[in-house]
Amino acid sequence: MDHPTRPVERYGSPRPWVRLVAIVATGLVALAAAGWLLWAAWSHSRPEVVSQLRGFEVIDKRTVSATITVERQRPVRAICVLKAQATDHTIVGELGVAIPADAPPTVTRTYEIPTERPATAAVLDGCTTDDQSRQR
């Protein structure tokens, strides 16, 4: 029975500079990945605008009022979307509101959402800015 040859005997040993290039390339890729991860974590942890639904009240069969708080990091215009839901969770009314750039950094306002049929709840989809397309 023949003994299989070892890879070193068959192909020769790798050159030292090849191993060094592989180590340096791996280090650069790891450094780039770590940099991207830090950048992504930093940019997503500090959104330009965040919003919160403070409360709602069903006024009548065609109107729901919702109170929201909007906080902005800098003076930018924010667009917020409020929706009214029926008992079966279908959307029966929607209202887009704008918070102007010259408003205070933290704003609490109440809006009335007109509905097409009776609603039982109000929901805040969130707010966006020109630079932040994800609703928060």
Image (spheres, helix red, strand yellow):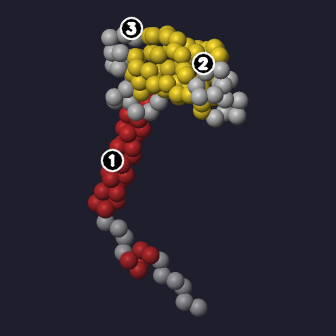
Q: CA distance from mark 2 to mark 1?
A: 56 Å
From the image, tell me which residue sits under label 3. Answer: 104
Residue sitting at x 64%, y 35%: 90
The label nearer to you, 1 versus 3, is 3
From the image, tell me which residue sits under label 2. Answer: 64
Residue sitting at x 36%, y 38%: 35
- Residue furthest to the top: 104
Say which amino acid is labelled 3.
Pro
Residue 38 place in picture, x, y as percent: 41, 34
First in sequence: mark 1 or mark 3? Answer: 1
Q: CA distance from mark 1 to mark 3?
A: 45 Å
- Position of residue 33 relative to residue 98, above or below, is below
**Number of the label disc, if any, that sits on residue 28:** 1
Judge whether residue 37 can be spotted in this image.
yes
First in sequence: mark 2 or mark 3? Answer: 2
Residue sitting at x 55%, y 13%: 67
- CB within 8 Å, label 2 to label 1: no
- Closer to us: 47 or 92: 92
Residue 87 place in picture, x, y as percent: 71, 30
- Position of residue 10 relative to residue 87, above or below, is below
The label nearer to you, 2 versus 3, is 2
- Residue furthest to the right: 87
First in sequence: mark 2 or mark 1? Answer: 1
The label nearer to you, 2 versus 1, is 2
